[in-house]
Image (tube, rainbow, N blue to C red):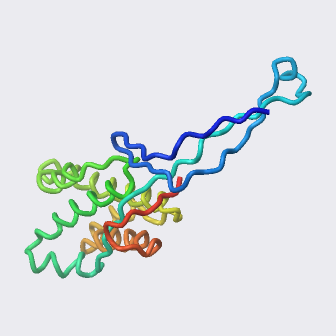
Amino acid sequence: MTEQASPEPATVDSPGHELALSQPAPVQMVPQLQPEAQSQFQGHGQLLPQPPAILAVGTMMKRRNVFAVWLGLPLVTLGIYNLVWWYKVNAEMAAFDRRHPVNPAATLLAFLFGWILVVPPYLAVYGTGQRIAERQRAAGLAPTCSPALGIVLVFVLGLHTLYYQSELNKIVDHYGAPAGAQVSLAA
């Protein structure tokens, strides 16, 4: 039997991804059959190492008060906070899981100028709901955020922001880490 040394653990950065190795994994050996034994699965072959597992890492989002997001701060700022919230939430989701790219500026523009065409703001609400569900999956939670419910709640006192923030808070509560902390993500 022959063994090969595993490569040193390293951080791998590629566009849109933030990956890191938590600890070097022990070398796992997988049998490789000799050519004459491959068809019959007889005999003993050599063992080859498998590469260690790579974990995805993200930046924790901020926990916000759902009532302040929905009613308090938008009233105080005459609605401007609502736009700030959409941008910040989408930017935080982009930093939380870089495997699924997010353009927070595009979401904000859909709200600022999309009302002219009627449809873009609703697409932004639906897309944000989908991204929240993806982030719940990435955190290892069952996705409970429904983009369709988010669209319905737009027409019910604008409750979609309250609903979406409560769904994002589930992710933050799951980790219990402060905003900006590095957390490991599920597959």
- The residue shown at (32%, 74%) is 63
Q: Decide: is 45 above or below 77.
A: above
Residue 91, position as x, y percentages in the image: 26, 57
Q: Decide: is 1 above or below 171.
A: above
Of residue 35 and residue 75, the one placed in the foreground of this image is 35
| Outermost residue to the left | 78
Of residue 142 and residue 180, the one placed in the foreground of this image is 180
Of residue 33 and residue 143, the one placed in the foreground of this image is 33
Question: Quick one: quadrant of the N terminus?
Answer: top right
Residue 23, position as x, y percentages in the image: 54, 55
Residue 18, position as x, y percentages in the image: 39, 49
Residue 49, position as x, y percentages in the image: 67, 38
Instruction: State left or right for residue 92 relative to residue 182.
Output: left
- The residue shown at (51%, 56%) is 22
Q: How many marks?
A: 0
Instruction: State left or right for residue 186 relative to residue 169.
Output: right
Q: Decide: is 150 above or below 63.
A: above
- The residue shown at (16%, 78%) is 73
Instruction: State left or right for residue 137 relative to residue 125.
Output: right
- The residue shown at (40%, 71%) is 172
